[in-house]
């Protein structure tokens, strides 16, 4: 299918075209996209739990030429907020390397978690550290800061800290248009943010939602647990998920267990 996406088929619909896809294994992203009938793929460049630099997929040229939209998820270890130099400095370096690699693949954005501080740290340290990232880093493509489910003293679990982070980051940025936001439904629910009206509350802070991570949550509201599950099999009302997807007007990526992703995508296409 072409870049313009497809018209949705549901009856109660908006009629807008939304591009929908999945987080897939980096061994062959385009094959995984085809198997799921996905318009969009997200994957890692290398070990998501490692500090090594980006690893390009073997099919990089085909990915660049493909009509499938690409998003890259940065490694989980990146924590540019922390007061600990021995984590913050390699985190910045890794973020910059991932961003360059993602741009060279033609990715639309690089998703990174907000990070966290130690228990007794002043949150202002984290906001200042985020500001410094965008003061110094040249961004060829947008960095999409994602909300997280839990963690002590997390930077992007709650909207109040997201608001302060956003103000700090955009104030210092060489190019504020390169700072974007990725809203994860599982993380918002498990992180203790009410999903009703959340799109408007986020937009009031950021003015933009660049990507939806559309996941159900195995765990209860405000549990702080980050365990994704296929749509309709967890604790989130599917109607709330659909409302978020309808109102955000952004591309959608499911980060759900692989075997159910084709069904998750089909469910979204049917109802949006
Ligand atoms: Zn996510």
Image (cartoon, rainbow, N blue to C red):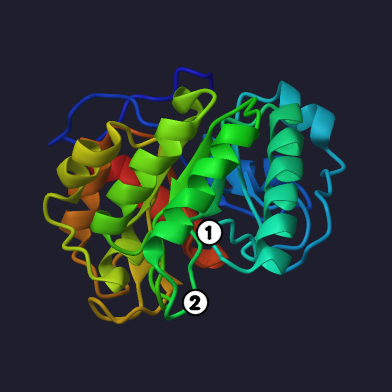
Task: State the residue in front, 122 or 27.
Answer: 122
Report the residue at 26% width, 67% height from top.
Answer: 189
Task: State the residue in front, 73 or 64.
Answer: 73
Task: State left or right for residue 63 relative to residue 155.
Answer: right
Give the distance between the C-alpha atoms of the residues marked 2 and 1, in whole angstroms: 10 Å
Report the residue at 30% width, 73% height from top.
Answer: 190
Q: Horizontal and vertical percent for residue 113?
A: 51, 57
Report the residue at 78% width, 56% height from top.
Answer: 46
When the figure is inspected, residue 209 is found, relative to residue 186, above or below; the finding is above
Badge 1 element: loop
When the figure is inspected, residue 126 is found, relative to residue 109, above or below; the finding is below
Q: Horizontal and vertical percent for residue 138?
A: 65, 28
Q: Quadrant of residue 150?
A: bottom left
Q: Earlier in the sequence, mark 2 or mark 1?
A: 1
- What number is the disc on residue 247? none
Q: Mark 1 sits on what residue?
A: 81
Quadrant where the C terminus is found in the figure: top left
Q: Horizontal and vertical percent for residue 235?
A: 25, 75
**Can residue 131 be seen in this snapshot?**
yes
- What number is the disc on residue 118? 2
Task: State the residue in front, 167 or 222.
Answer: 167
Report the residue at 23% width, 68% height from top.
Answer: 236
**Can residue 272 be seen in this snapshot?**
no
Badge 2 element: loop
Q: Quadrant of residue 252?
A: top left
């Amino acid at each position: 299918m072409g870049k313009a996406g497809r018209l949705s088929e549901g009856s109660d619909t908006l009629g807008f075209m939304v591009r929908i896809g999945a987080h897939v294994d980096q061994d062959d992203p385009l094959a995984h996209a085809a198997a799921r009938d996905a318009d969009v793929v997200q994957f890692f460049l290398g070990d998501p739990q490692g500090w090594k630099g980006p690893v390009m997929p073997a099919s990089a040229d085909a990915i660049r030429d493909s009509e499938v939209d690409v998003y890259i998820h940065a490694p989980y270890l990146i924590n540019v907020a922390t007061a600990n130099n021995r984590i913050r400095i390699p985190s910045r370096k890794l973020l910059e390397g991932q961003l360059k690699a993602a741009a060279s693949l033609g990715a639309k954005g690089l998703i990174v978690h907000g990070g966290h501080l130690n228990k007794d740290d002043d949150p202002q340290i984290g906001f200042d550290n985020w500001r410094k990232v965008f003061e110094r880093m040249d961004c060829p493509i947008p960095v999409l800061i994602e909300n997280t489910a839990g963690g002590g003293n997390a930077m992007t679990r709650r909207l109040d800290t997201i608001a302060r982070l956003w103000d700090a980051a955009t104030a210092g940025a060489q190019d504020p248009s390169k700072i974007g936001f990725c809203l994860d439904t599982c993380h918002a629910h498990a992180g203790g943010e009410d999903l009703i009206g959340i799109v408007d509350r986020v937009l009031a802070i950021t003015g933009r939602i660049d990507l939806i991570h559309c996941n159900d949550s195995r765990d209860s509201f405000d549990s702080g647990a980050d365990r994704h599950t296929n749509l309709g099999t967890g604790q989130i009302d599917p109607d709330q998920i659909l409302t978020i997807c309808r109102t955000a007007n952004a591309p959608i990526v499911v980060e759900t267990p692989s075997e159910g992703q084709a069904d998750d995508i089909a469910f979204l296409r049917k109802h949006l």
